[in-house]
Image: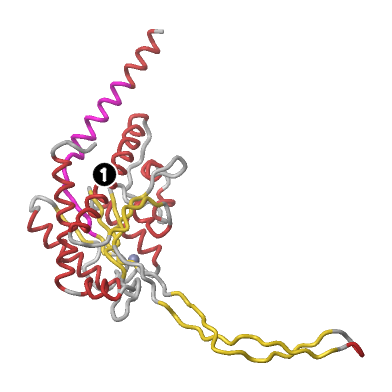
Amino acid sequence: MKGILRGIIGVVIILLGSIGYIQAQQSTLRTIIVDPGHGLPDPGAKGHYSNESDIILAVAQKLVQKLRDSLPGVKVIMTRTDRNLPGHLTSAPEANRWRAKFANENHGDLFVCIHANDAPSTTHRKTIGYRTKVYYTGKGSKRRKHTRRVPRYSYYKVPSTAHGTETYVWAVNKNDSKQDFVQSNNPDELYGEKGDSTVPMFSSTEEKILATLRTKKYFSRSLLLANLIEEQYVKQGRFSRGVKQRNEVGIWVLHATAMPSILTEIGFITDRSEEDYMNSQGGQQQIASDLLQAIIKYKTLLDAGHVH
Ligand SMILES: [Zn+2]
């Protein structure tokens, strides 16, 4: 009985110690990783006259400048500062693994991934007349000729009306969570490369508890920042499609970064007026300052100890 009691007390001490440790470790924002998605040869989504890759690079650069001006104590690092991806990257999955690894190796406390959305136009048809189609039934002497009137169509494309912003966080559910990633002992699985992982390995119970607490923290912090960003867009008169929790290939990079992380879609490049807005200096400055304001609020809440 005494042994069990001692065991329970031991676990409680570990838990309390872990909470204290994490709060001490992560109560401030020291390093922000700003990630403009894509990069040539991957241009991302295409608009009427521009591509996603260049737009989000321009917005990311403005955001980084503002962050450095407003938060001089915080280290801000970009995954790419060039139109092109680093030369050794040949595919999108490879590029995403590289992004996550870059963020983890640089010990980011926050990962801000910037993208622009697109929605394909839909094809419709209208009847422009009729033609006579000949067909036959039966065999031999019973073979008969028939005719039938069939419509003739003209096909045309209607551009999507989708517009607005949305921000994604990696959903944590029972079967699949960032925790599995954070706890994984197999670096090959994480990055597809041998012996080159910067993700911490967990062996003891205490370390596993720490990983669990971190995962929960990452999720709630990611969700907090995502909400602050969408709120900021709305304040500027943008249409918000909301904060979305997903687990899918397109946002895998959020899963693989061992830190709070969000992916924000700053508008639809397929929408003419949003494409103009995102290409304009004024629009880019405004989006960058929306992101800046949200990050400042996030940091303030963190530093004040209001976020766990
Ligand atoms: Zn994209």
The quadrant the N terminus occupies is top left
Q: Residue furthest right?
A: 141
Name the residue: 31% across, 54% down. 242
- Give the x, y percent position of residue 36: 26, 64
Q: In this picture, is 286 found above or below 243?
A: below
Q: In this picture, is 98 found above or below 206?
A: below
Q: In this picture, is 169 found above or below 212?
A: below
- Give the x, y percent position of residue 33: 22, 56
Residue type marked 1: Arg
Q: In the image shown, does 245 or 31 lie closer to the viewer?
A: 245
Magenta-colored stretch includes residue 153: no
Magenta-colored stretch includes residue 23: yes
Residue at mark 1? 221
Compared across the picture, whether 160 is left or right of 34 comes to right
Name the residue: 21% across, 38% down. 307
- Give the x, y percent position of residue 283: 18, 69
Tell how many labels: 1
User: Which range of residues does the magenta coloring cover?
Assistant: 12-34
Name the residue: 20% across, 62% down. 237
The quadrant the C terminus occupies is top left
